Amino acid sequence: MKKLIIIGSNCIHTYNYYLMIKDFFDQIVIITNKKDHNFFYSIDDNIYYLNFSIKRFPQYLLSFIKLKNIIKKFKPNIIHSHQANVYSLFGAIFSKKFKIPFIITTWGSDILINPKKNFIYKILAKFVLKRANIITSDSLYMSYEIRQIIKDKNKKIETINFGVNVYGKRSFKKENIIFSNRLHKKLYRIDLIIKLFYEFIKEKNEYWELVIAGTGELTDQLKKLTNELNLCNYVKFVGWLDSDSNIEYYKKSKIFISIPESDATSISLLEAMNFGCIPIVSNIPANLEWIIDGLNGIVADNFNHLIFEKALKIDYERLININSFLIGEKASKETNKKKYIEIYEYLLER
């Protein structure tokens, strides 16, 4: 009997990963945290809500003991943690204690941002990464950064993303919509997108609309900025979108914009490419693995409103051909599911 424990935050990425690989295992246990938006409420497998915040040390210690008992009772074949942080600390410790194969799937911030904040984050990341039998990353750049942290040329690191459902090369009825669906945090620079759109509108582009999906700690500030720039008739805040609503906006948006200061491979970018949007992205290494400036999107160095005009001058038919090919070859759920299953089979055989 194949049994897996997944440890990760209660978010859409962990949930989608669970859906992707759940059929391979006979039993799965989910270890996650409690959040207002519970993505795991409807699953058939067992789920445990534990505290992962060291700031609440008594509850953290209690969660540590609970997980130990869960592992002893469930007897998993593999422990798979998402993010190289306090979530993986649980898995790193108990996988060694019980001699269970341990995988870490890294995300962007736990490798590209947190270890550079202070030495404690770096020590934590290095500790859990070195404990893993296999590490996965969603970009070549992040795989390189992992190697720099652990200083181990023999550690097995696989570059795999979560993948998207391939829609294929199709015609979409596009509207004059610029779509942004990243979180409302400083990292993602949604305020800059609003300012760039303001300049774009002033250049007689009044028939365009900026749709801002998502939520976050800066949502109120972003709405205030929109009011101050008199953009209420041009900017629409649509909040947190479910998968179907998100897809509908991809289908009808001509341009997708995502300009974070740092990021690994963005599923939102892959989805936008999949549905025929013209991507505008920031000049960071992970984006350069997918977008060539002026060919299948825009890589923005200098942020001004001309990036929108430049995007609209791209040969659209060629862009569609390139992006459809890239998604089919490198970013489909089936392709990446197969890669993860191969990892599981390798560990189970050993």
Image (tube, grey):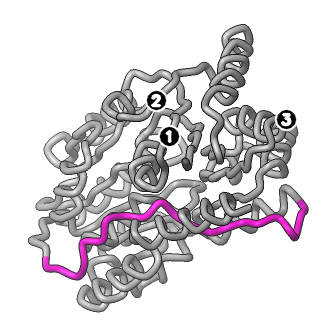
Label 1 sits on residue: 28
Where disc 2 sits, the SS reads strand
Name the one closer to the observer, 96 or 253.
96
Residues under labels 3 and 1: Cα distance? 32 Å
Label 1: element kind? strand
| 249 lies left or right of 259 | left
Q: Are marks 2 and 1 in contact (CB under 8 Å)?
A: yes
Q: Choose the circle earlier in sequence order: 3 or 1.
A: 1
Label pair 2/3, CB-CB below 8 angstroms: no
Which of the pair 287/97 is nearer the observer?
A: 97
Residue 148, compared with residue 78, is above or below; it is below
* For residue 235, above or below residue 317: above
Residue 3's quadrant in the figure?
Answer: top right
Gap between marks 2 and 1 measured at Cα: 7 Å
In the rendered image, the residue lying farthest to the top is 58
Q: Is residue 273 magenta?
A: no
Horizontal side of 226 relative to 233 (left or right) equals: right
Asked which quadrant contains residue 8, the reply is top right
Magenta residues span 151-171
Report x, y in % for residue 258: 42, 59
Position of 315 with respect to 131 (left or right) is: left
**Pointer 2 or 1: first along the chain:** 1
Q: What element carries label 3?
A: helix
| Type of amino acid under label 1 | Ile
Q: Quadrant of the C terminus?
A: bottom right
Task: Identify the residue under disc 2.
Answer: 46
Tell me the residue at 67%/50% (across/down). Answer: 104
Q: Mark 3 points at which residue?
A: 120
Q: Which of the two marks, 2 or 3, is nearer to us in this view?
A: 2
* Rendered residue at 63%/46% (across/down): 80
Check disc 2 and give the amino acid type.
Answer: Asn
